[in-house]
Amino acid sequence: MSDKRRKKLNSIGFAWKFLETWGVRFQQLVKYKRIHGHCNVPRHCKANMQLGKWVNNQRNTKETMSKNKWNQLNSIEFV
């Protein structure tokens, strides 16, 4: 992202935390897959409720998801 674009987003109070949260959840999913061998996190995963909800949301919004995020998920065989 260009510095100019970042400044414009900052000027309107863009919520960067949302983008940070996506990255955090993605890393949690990578760890989950490393442990369990798959990305099928239960929606009500007792170990990490937020991750289960996040995975479910990613599956439900894949048609509108950015290509970059979709590529990241595909890189770990999210399916």
Image (spheres, helix red, strand yellow):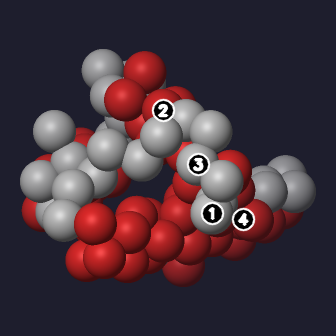
Q: Residue at x 53, y 63 (%)?
A: 25
Q: Position of residue 15 (x, y in %)?
A: 79, 57
Q: CA distance from mark 4 to mark 1?
A: 26 Å
Spatial CA span between label 2 and label 4: 22 Å
Q: Secondary structure at mark 1?
A: loop
* Numbered disc 3: secondary structure: loop
Residue 66 located left or right of residue 13: left
| In this rendering, the label closer to the viewer, 2 or 1 | 1
Residue 16, numbered label = 4
Distance between mark 3 and mark 1 Cα atoms:
5 Å
Label 2, label 1: how far apart the Cα atoms are: 15 Å
Query: Is residue 1 visible in the rendered structure shown here?
Result: no
Which of the two residues, 6 or 76, is positioned nearer the viewer here? 76
Identity, as a three-letter code, of the amino acid under mark 3 = Cys
Q: Earlier in the sequence, mark 2 or mark 1?
A: 1
- Sequence-first disc among 2 and 4: 4
**Picture disc at residue 47:** 1
Residue occupied by mark 2: 56
- Earlier along the polypeptide chain: callout 3 or callout 2? 3
Q: Is residue 27 left or right of residue 17?
A: left
Q: Is residue 22 above or below residue 42?
A: below
Q: Which residue is mark 3?
A: 45
Horizontal side of residue 55 vs 47, given as left or right: left
Look at label 4 and name its amino acid: Trp
> In the picture, which quadrant includes the C terminus?
top left
Q: Considering only order in the chain, which callout, 4 or 3, is on the residue closer to the N terminus?
A: 4
Residue 22: tell me if it is visible.
Answer: yes
Spatial CA distance of label 3 from label 2 is: 11 Å
Q: Nearer the viewer, mark 2 or mark 4?
A: 2
